[in-house]
Image (cartoon, rainbow, N blue to C red):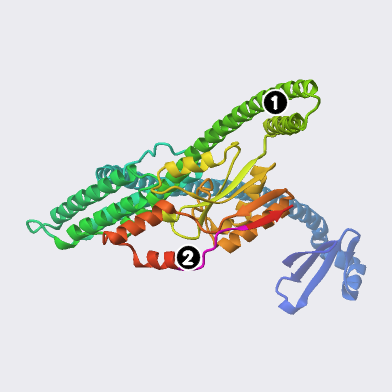
Amino acid sequence: MFRLISLASAVGGVVVTIAALGSPEQERIEMFVGGSGLFAGSAVAALLADAGVRRKFKPILDVEKETRYRQRLAQKGLEDVQKKIEHQRKLAQEELDKIDQAKVAANNKVRLADEHLDLLQHEVADMKNQKKGLQDENAGLRQRINDLNQDVEDLLDLDDAGFAARRYPGLDSKRLADLLKQNREKQKALGKQLLQECKLTEVTVGGSRTQGAAFVRQTVTALLRGFNGECDAAISMLKHSNDSTVLGKIERAFKFYEKQARTRVEMPWDSRLSELKVDEAYLVHENALTKQAEREEQIELRRQEREEEQARREAEEAKEAAEREAEKYEQLLARAREEAAANDQSEEYLEKIRELERRVQEAEDNRERAISRAQMTRSGHVYVISNIGSFGHNVFKVGMTRRLEPTDRVRELGDASVPFPFDIHAMIFTEDAPGLENAIHNRISARRLNLVNLRREFFTITWEELVREAEAAAEEIGVTAEIRWTRIAEAEQYRQSVSERADTNQPLRFLEQKRLQKVDANAFASSSTGVG
């Protein structure tokens, strides 16, 4: 009997190992059973060649069939196993896919959760920032409210201290208005600074520095109110002619209130208070000077209008008088000729006729001159006058008048607000009196006494220089004028007053006496100069 030792699958068939029962292990026979039959080594071939052997091993030879069967079973089992494995693999893959999907979903959820968390964190941060911003804004508003309350308190105290806005009547200049506004703002800022310094005081009242600061603030407010009140009252009375008086009041007021601030306890005070008030007074005084100059200009214009009207009337009257005179002499001449004809042309009548003819011609010339004078709008006299009793030596007034009698204008000037009459040094008739006057003024403008009001035609200049500049001005504009100069001023009333004062031992300034002596020593009567 044989027994099957092993059955193993091989490529294309099955390897069958058999052995006879009772035979040793080494007597095994291995056969390969394939699709093409049974093949074995040479020993097997010989064995199969023997029919007896084939019968003897017939049961074994059915192994091929069995092998094929088992191969099919194995193949089927293998396929089943493979199917199970594939099924399990698919199930496992599906599980893995589900796990992956779940993982992706979980990751998405985590990502969404993280994003939501970040969003919430940003919202929390924004809310914190908004909260801080609102807190800061609230703190700022509270501080602003406190500042506004303090500003209101300061404004009330500043108004109480005399720093309220002021109005300046008659102020038309925008430049001066802006400068005054800036000045008042500086005063107010200085006052506010002084009131704030009151909080830093070391003064105590009843052991309390707060009450001490309040006491100092009240005291400084009262001192400022007094100082500003006195200064504002003085400035409100400021005119073009009393600036020194107003400045003196400001100085005295400052010294008084500064003393009050220093002699009690140490109060905040500042010298700039006086400086700013003085600046304010100068600005108001400049406006007053401008207004005065405008008034004087209007007065001068009206005076010129009156003078021109008077000159026109005088010229008309002169023309009428000349015409009447000419008519009178013509009538006399006609009568004289009749008488001469009746008396055979005697020498006496002929001489009378010649005289009347001369007078008729003279009257005709006067009439023509009056007509010409009335028609000329720029003709007139430029005068040079002085008043040593009122203004001293080497001070001359150079003006212009269109009157037929220019000395009337000089007499009017001597009657207006001066103690002595004016003396005439030159009276220049020209067909362009305004042009000559303006030319002389331009050449000696640096010698003006009043540099603000140019209507004041007074000049500090030596006699020799004035003569030289006046003649040069006439040549410069090409006017024809006959100029007769008188150097020494009579100053009769003034010299008589000096003499009478000396006789009665009344005081006279020593320097003034010396100047009079020097002028008298170098005087000469007059000199004449012609400019053509």
Residue pictured at 40% horizontal, 54% vertical: 494
In the picture, residue 430 is in which quadrant? top right
Q: CA distance from mark 2 to mark 1?
A: 50 Å
Task: Say whether residue 150 is left or right of residue 79.
Answer: left
The percent coordinates of residue 40 (x first, y second) are 87, 70
Q: Mark 1 or mark 2, which is nearer the start of the sequence?
A: 1
Residue pictured at 35% horizontal, 58% vertical: 498
One can see residue 123 in this view: no
- Identify the element where label 1 is drawn: helix
Amino acid at dot 2: Val
Given residues 128 and 91, the one toward you in this image is: 128
Given residues 113 and 75, the one toward you in this image is: 113
- Identify the element where label 2 is drawn: helix
Q: Residues within 10 Å of mark 1 (few under 14, many from 20)?
A: many
Residues drawn in magenta: 518-527
Labels 2 and 1 touching (C-beta < 8 A): no
Q: Which residue is mark 1?
A: 329
Q: Is the N terminus in the top left, top right, bottom left or bottom right quadrant? A: bottom right
The percent coordinates of residue 470 (x first, y second) are 64, 55
Given residues 219 and 336, the one toward you in this image is: 336
Q: Residues within 10 Å of mark 2 (few under 14, many from 20)?
A: few
Placement of 67 over or under 317, stated as above or below: below
Residue pictured at 72% horizontal, 48% vertical: 479
Residue pictured at 53% horizontal, 33% vertical: 302
Question: Residue 519, labelled with which disc?
Answer: 2
The percent coordinates of residue 120 (x first, y second) are 46, 46
Amino acid at dot 1: Tyr
Residue 274 located within the stretch drawn in magenta: no
Given residues 86 and 81, the one toward you in this image is: 86
In the picture, residue 351 is in which quadrant? top right
Residue 524 located within the stretch drawn in magenta: yes
